[in-house]
Image (cartoon, rainbow, N blue to C red):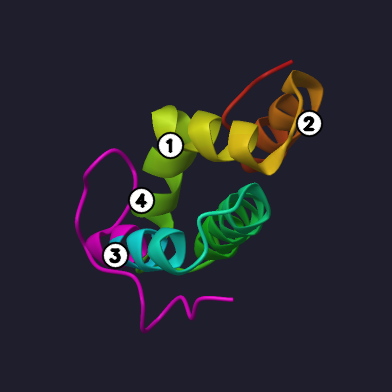
Amino acid sequence: MLSPTKTMASGKNAGMSGNRKKHCRRKLRSNGSLKGLKSLSEAIILQSIEDMFSPDHRNESLEFFSGNSFKVCSKLAGLDTKKQSEILFLMGGNKK
């Protein structure tokens, strides 16, 4: 799992920090399989949930969950629409 204090940058590009994007690219190059994509997507979602509780990274996390990045990662992680909605509801991004 990525460390929230050491791997997050203050970039605001589609809800993903520069370090997170670099980490994604490295993972894809080293393991291009679907299993690798699924694991990486799950890790990004979990890290973003953890970042919600960090004052330094909360805004990035909110951007991730409110933008297209969450949708893409959710699909790659195999989350159906119901699970996506449940996560957004827990994060305060979707009112059922």
Q: Quadrant of the N terminus?
A: bottom right
Q: Residues within 10 Å of mark 1 (few under 14, many from 20)?
A: some
Looking at the rendered structure, the kind of residue marked 1 is Ser
**Disc nearer the start of the sequence (2/3):** 3
Q: Is residue 6 magenta?
A: yes
Disc 4 versus disc 3: distance between alpha carbons? 20 Å
Q: Residues within 10 Å of mark 2 (few under 14, many from 20)?
A: few
Q: Residues within 10 Å of mark 3 (few under 14, many from 20)?
A: few
In this rendering, the label closer to the viewer, 4 or 3: 3
**Disc nearer the start of the sequence (4/2):** 4
Mark on residue 22? 3
**Disc nearer the start of the sequence (4/3):** 3
Mark on residue 83? 2
**SS at badge 3:** helix
Q: Which residues are magenta?
A: 1-21
- Is residue 67 in sight in this rendering? no
Q: Residues within 10 Å of mark 4 (few under 14, many from 20)?
A: some
Residue drawn at x 28%, y 68% is 19
Looking at the rendered structure, the kind of residue marked 2 is Lys
Looking at the rendered structure, the kind of residue marked 3 is Lys
Q: Is residue 9 magenta?
A: yes
Q: Position of residue 31 (x, y in %)?
A: 52, 64
Q: Position of residue 58 (x, y in %)?
A: 42, 57
